[in-house]
Image (cartoon, rainbow, N blue to C red):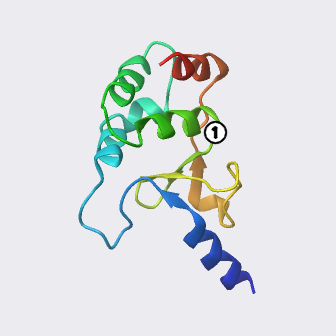
Amino acid sequence: MRTFVAALLGALLLMIGPGPATAQETPVQTLLQTFRAEIEQSSRRTIGPAIDAIAGSGLARAQEVLLRWQAREMWLRKSDGLFYLAPNGGATPLHSKMWTVVKPLAMLRNMIWIS
């Protein structure tokens, strides 16, 4: 049963970019990877360029990524460093040790909101 639930949760995760078996990256995943260090260790002084780049990218999913990041619904898979959007309002993945939620501080959530 636990394996089934894990497989179901994995299928429900809305990925921003490719899975491990996919060689191509999506433009928004590429952009997030460019600013991965700033996103993971975000502070008021360092996060501005990342937010500006995402907001100004013109990518179709950029606004959704910013809104979901602000709502703490963006996750980072530790095994490959790819960003994912969590389903169901940021529900914790079953194997939570494999994931890190990308949690912007309150002041950073305001910066994301303004962009």
Q: Residue furthest bottom?
A: 1
Position of residue 80 relative to residue 29, above or below, is below
* Residue 36 image-quadrant placement: top left
Residue 112 x/y as whole percent: 52, 23
Where is residue 40 drawn, in percent x and y? 48, 36
Disc 1 residue type?
Arg
Where is mark 1, residue-wise?
72
From this viewpoint, which residue is outermost toward the top?
45
Q: Quadrant of residue 35?
A: top left
Residue extending farthest right: 1
Identify whether 22 is placed above or below 80: below
Figure disc tally: 1
Whether residue 71 sits left or right of residue 112 in the image: it is: right
Tell me where residue 101 sits by quadrant.
top right
- Taking the spot 33% from the left edge, 26% from the top edge, the residue there is 53
Q: In this view, does 62 lie to the left or right of 9?
A: left
At mark 1, the secondary structure is loop
Q: Nearer the viewer, residue 25 or 60?
A: 60
Query: Eyeballing the image, is 15 above or below 37?
Result: below
Q: Where is residue 25 in the image (x, y as percent from the top left)?
A: 28, 56
Residue visible at 44% across and 21% down in the picture:
47
The image position of residue 2, as x and y in percent, is 73, 82
Is 29 situated left or right of 111 in this image?
Answer: left
